[in-house]
Image: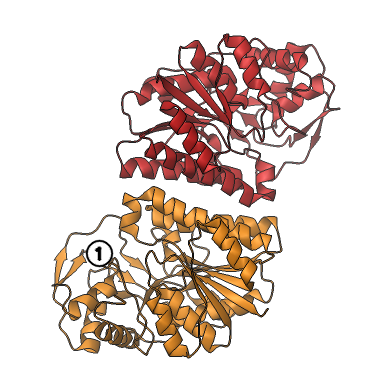
Chain colours: A orange, B red
Amino acid sequence: MTSNILVTGGAGYVGSHTVVELINAGYSVVVLDNLVNASMESIKRVEEITGKSVPSHSIDLLDRNALEGLFKKYKFSAVMHFAGLKAVGESCELPLLYYKTNLVGTINLLEVMKENGVYNMIFSSSATVYGAPVYLPLDENHPVGGCTNPYGKTKYFIENMLIDLCKADNQWNIILLRYFNPVGSHISGKIGESPQGVPNNLMPYVAQVAVGKRKELTVYGEDYDTPDGTGVRDYIHVVDLALGHLAALKKLDEKCGCKIYNLGTGKGYSVLDMVKAFEKASGKPIPYKITARRLGDIASCYADASLAENELHWKAERSLDQMCEDLWRWQSMNPNGYL
Amino acid sequence: MTSNILVTGGAGYVGSHTVVELINAGYSVVVLDNLVNASMESIKRVEEITGKSVPSHSIDLLDRNALEGLFKKYKFSAVMHFAGLKAVGESCELPLLYYKTNLVGTINLLEVMKENGVYNMIFSSSATVYGAPVYLPLDENHPVGGCTNPYGKTKYFIENMLIDLCKADNQWNIILLRYFNPVGSHISGKIGESPQGVPNNLMPYVAQVAVGKRKELTVYGEDYDTPDGTGVRDYIHVVDLALGHLAALKKLDEKCGCKIYNLGTGKGYSVLDMVKAFEKASGKPIPYKITARRLGDIASCYADASLAENELHWKAERSLDQMCEDLWRWQSMNPNGYL
């Protein structure tokens, strides 16, 4: 048996882009996805892009037996754990679903990994674990745990589990990657973010306005302490983010124990910056209206990305224009996503 | 069907004492326990004390089907959720076991409660959620989340789940009781704390020294900033603690939503205070040796217990001497616990 990388949530947005880069770099990949918030169409597209077939399994991490079966079928050298629910608003309405899916899914995965002697993991964490910034840019030593919604708490709780696991047993090598705001798409326009219903994130919403699916963008607050009053975030091209995972995978070979890295660009852009950049890339006007601030939103959030550069030798390289051009290509080629 | 109180972990130390007080107050009780860290002998003793039979089920909260069966068999008006692993040191060595047992067990319980329309819960939390005190006495508004061990983190994480659940769905009424340090036993000497192996907590260790099972007590640190240099804690008689649960149960009738209360006495005693009090109660010398501080231990920890007094109309009433006399009665009548 050759050694494979198991990618949980591999049919999702970040997962599918990472699968492309893994295959391009010569890795063997096995995808697991429960398809609750994704479509196997994305894996077909990955196969078109890469010219390789990708073994994919429609398995829920809560189905312990199916998971055990998968680990019997393949030999994995590492697991990239993207699977999980991720909508902030929904998590406030359905906290038990979020705690169950994200925590129990991860606990099952860790147990089955251990039973099969697989001790290498890369986990999709989020800058949301930092809560409201005490200082900027956010480095990895910034205090964590100030999350106010169940989604963010699940990321923080899982980080704790993984850190404690590495402390207790030095066989484990686990890298926590704290994502800032992934946007954009693969340059082919074949894969991208395909939200169900109303997009939760800014750029998919903007793209749906451009393509005529939504009337106008709602901007929440123009009175933040930022250059133009709208919220500032660190948007990172999803392909750069995917490449960050490959850099982390190499780090695992060093038997690194538990490591934590921000994956961001280090640059902050405002909502209006993003709207302008997307109008330029798409040639479409993005009508918007300003309303009141949204509870729980912060003014600014951007990364100190130097630790990943120093230790993983990885740096985000794609520009804001590329993010918007690639997103527009995906959106205009696939106005309804994978549907 | 009459309405029952389900007591998870009802064969354990705090659970069994609470079952006695529930029955004495006229409640119908059903006990669930996986017996991993408890013995059904405690329930036999509860039956001797109360003269009532106590329906008891050897069920693990991780066994979802068995749990569903129990909720089909009985109609519950509320759940007192004591079940969980609780040894700090062990939790550092076996974090995944602790996260799984405590978190997944609680998630299963909440799901099955919801499916059966049971929305009232009292949860055994702990003063450990406060982490290192920023001020003393600890009131319920003290910052939480500074726990450094997986056991304490599971209490903190579960508190978060329960708070979020109440926020999302106002059918839920959940009271989080933050225990300080329960000691002592029922006055009959028939039930008490029966630790497996070397006791993790001070007073069971002291009692085993008195009864000749252990040679001497080890006191960790005599250079803390406390009156005699040894660590100060808020010891509460387990029967007072049990009565706090009955007071909380009445509060649930008010459809109180989510409430949080300290259960402590408000008084701090040092390790050496406790040793002296136990020597007096038992008439036995307690030899001890002083060694270095233990990592993660804090100097002092005691409650502001006024909120429970004001809102639950409950107050700890048993003295330090009673705690020691009752513990000694249990220990001398049962030198090997329930074994």
Task: Specify the subunit that label 1 lies on.
Answer: A
Residue tagged 1: A224
- Return the x and y of residue A288 as percentages of the image width and height: 15, 72
Helix, strand or loop at label 1? It is loop
The answer, for residue A264, to whether it is visible in the render is: no
Between A146 and B19, which is closer to the camera in this rendering?
B19
Between A208 and B152, which is closer to the camera in this rendering?
A208
Residue type for callout 1: Tyr
What residue is rendered at 66% in x and 39% in y? B87
- Return the x and y of residue B77 as percentages of the image width and height: 39, 26
For residue A308, side relative to residue A180 (left or right): right
In this rendering, is residue B330 above or below B178? above
For residue A267, side relative to residue B125 (left or right): left
In this rendering, is residue A17 above or below A71? below
- Return the x and y of residue A222 as percentages of the image width and height: 20, 66
Q: How many marks?
A: 1
Between A31 and B140, which is closer to the camera in this rendering?
A31
Location of the N terminus of chain B (image quadrant): top left
Location of the C terminus of chain B (image quadrant): top right
For residue B158, side relative to residue B312 (left or right): right
What residue is rendered at 66% in x and 80% in y? A2
- Return the x and y of residue A220 as percentages of the image width and height: 21, 64
Between A322 and A109, which is closer to the camera in this rendering?
A109
Q: Quadrant of residue B82?
A: top right
What residue is rendered at 18% in x and 89% in y? A283
Q: Quadrant of residue B162?
A: top left
In this rendering, is residue B68 above or below A84? above
Q: Quadrant of residue B319?
A: top right
